[in-house]
Amino acid sequence: MEAPPIAVSRVAFGYGRAGHGRASSGPEEVLQDVSLTVAAGRLTALLGPNGAGKSTLFRLIVGRLQPLRGEISIFGQPAASLDSVSRARLVGYLPQEVRAAFGFSVGEVVLMGRYPHLRFGLESAHDRGVASRCLERTDTAHLAARRFDTLSGGERQRVLLAAALAQEPRILLLDEPTAALDWHHQHEVLALLDSLAAEGLAICLVTHDLNLAARYCHQLYLLEAGRIAAAGGPDEVLRGPALRRVYGQALRVIDDPDLGRPLILGPLPGEAPCPPA
Amino acid sequence: MSAGLTARRLVLGLLGCALVLAVAVGVSLLLGSVRVDPAEVWAALRDPSRRPGNLHYTIVIGQRLPRVLLGLLVGGGLGLCGASFQALLRNPLADPYTLGVASGSALGASLALAAKWSLQVGPFGGVQVAALLGGLAVTAVIWRIGVVRREFRVESLLLGGVTVALVTSSAIIVIRTLADPHFLVTLDRWLLGSLAAALPRDSWSLLPFLLVGGLPLLALGPAFNQLALGEELAHGRGINAGRVQVWTFLAASLVTAGTVSVAGPIGFVGLIVPHAVRSIWGPDHRLLLPGSALVAGGFLLLCDTLARTVVAPTEMPVGVVTAVIGGPVFLLLLWRRR
């Protein structure tokens, strides 16, 4: 059997003075003993409150940060042993914060996704073909000639998703890919991710929308203060005791009458949304 | 898909930029305070050894040619560094002097001029060495401020650059107050930037800086494109953002210090030329970097030709001409962007 696209094993990480010769003071650990697997052909969701360590975990996987302890492997190879371009051919990463400088067009931004595949520093006709297919798939082809910095938040997110797809990775890490999208495009993007997973991609996304995770994702990890509080399918994680512990007792879980999946609702009037301790 | 840089567009763009430079070289060789017939200019260029005693020969080969060579190297360096600093700071208003390199060089040169330092190191004169050391010293200070654990802090760099510029200009005022009034004229000429004293050896002494610092910058176009969307995204595409930023900072500072040491701080070239190239050929750094170098070389030569001819037989510092032309052009560009 092929090694899983991503395997994170007992990883710990702390910001602060790590690796700066003052280990005695000890960094505060924002991730502790985290293990998870991202499988091909499925949508994996990372859930959890702000500051739980979801984005940090992504940054560790793409090598932007180095773990204090533990192992991260990509298709069985230690992540640290991959050079940055080989890693970029395997892993597409859409961070939460993206800037826009110098008035690049949407078409140019999507073509930039081809960077890890370029041979002589210029895109070929093949690269252009890939980029234009990715624009089509994310419903952004009509924006190709527009300046990227004039787009709305939702349009930007779809264009960046197109750029990530143009990278033709086998793994996609998406940090809140639906945060700025309207209801229609949220479902459209998740349906697209679902079909990409069906084509064999391994996709892991961070989301705060528990219902989108319930509806589309196969494997869920709930993070709480740097630890995995629950892991499993939507039924296990969203109906389990950990969810209320993390998000507060006032949260209600009912059955979606049509799909039978869990549906998460907010507190009743008069009940305070109990914040995590 | 319409957008994007193709090989064809890259070649056409570079040809366009090279044409600007070629026209500027021609104009600079033909025009000057002394009228030399184009046929004589051509004859002198074709056979430099023919008539060494001839006055027109001396003007074309002995004066205009070294000046044209230095102008295109200094301008090219400034254009390339301007585009690089703009990419590095992700800000189209940055220029080669934003991080204080030129202020350091100015302080170094002022000290050397005030002390009448007559050292000669290989092709380098005393003022030139002092300007270089000043620029590199500022680079080291800014490095300490803005590069933390090999990570690049843009805000600290900008604040550090502005502060260093203020401190050095105060120090220069102190030097002016104490110095012999005689030397003020020389100092002012230096501080405004000029190609007037161009000798062939100046071009030779600038060349190593362009080769060591400039060539690597030219290769960074694709990485600068990725960095325009942020370090995090660039990292995901396989770029070591921190390393690219640190090397860009060092290479561009080195080239800038080199140009300032031979010609003084010539303003606006590194700011408006990348703007103009971007507005004509688009923001892609694979074309923008070499294109800015070519066009800036041409722009500086044209400004220098004006500096030599408008008030002939005397001449203005070219830094005044670039400011008088560059300032309004820049305002116009900003106006159009509204």
Image (cartoon, rainbow, N blue to C red):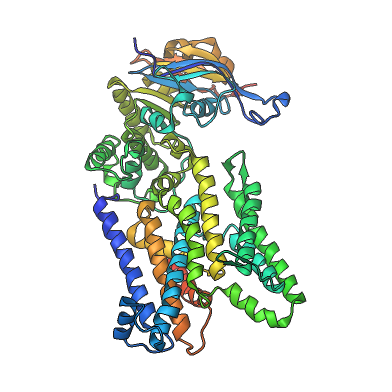
Does A149 sit above or below residue B18?
A: above
Tell me, yes or no, if residue B199 can be seen here: yes
Near-viewer residue (B263 or B17)? B263
Position of B208 with respect to A186 (left or right) is right
Query: Visible in this render: residue A250?
Result: no
- Residue A20 is situated, as x and y percent measured from the top left of the image, at 66, 31
- Give the residue drawn at x 38%, y 64%: B294
Q: Is residue A201 left or right of residue A59?
A: left
Q: With respect to residue B291, does A51 lie above or below?
A: above
Image quadrant occupied by the N terminus of chain A: top left
Q: Name the image quarter holding residue B262.
A: bottom right
Residue B284, horizontal then vertical, whole percent: 36, 52
In the image, residue A273 lies at what x, y percent? 59, 24
Percent position (x, y) of residue B207? 47, 61
Toward which corner of the image does residue B300 lie, by quadrant?
A: bottom left
Figure label count: 0
Looking at the rendering, in which quadrant would you find the C terminus of chain A?
top right
Left or right of A31 on screen, residue B67: left
Residue B269's place in the image compared with A78, above or below, is below
In this view of the protein, which residue sits in the foreground, A8 or A177? A8
Is A212 placed left or right of A55 in the picture?
Answer: left
Q: Is residue A189 above or below residue A227?
A: below
Name the residue at 46% across, 75% down. Answer: B325
- Residue placed farthest to the right in the image? B178
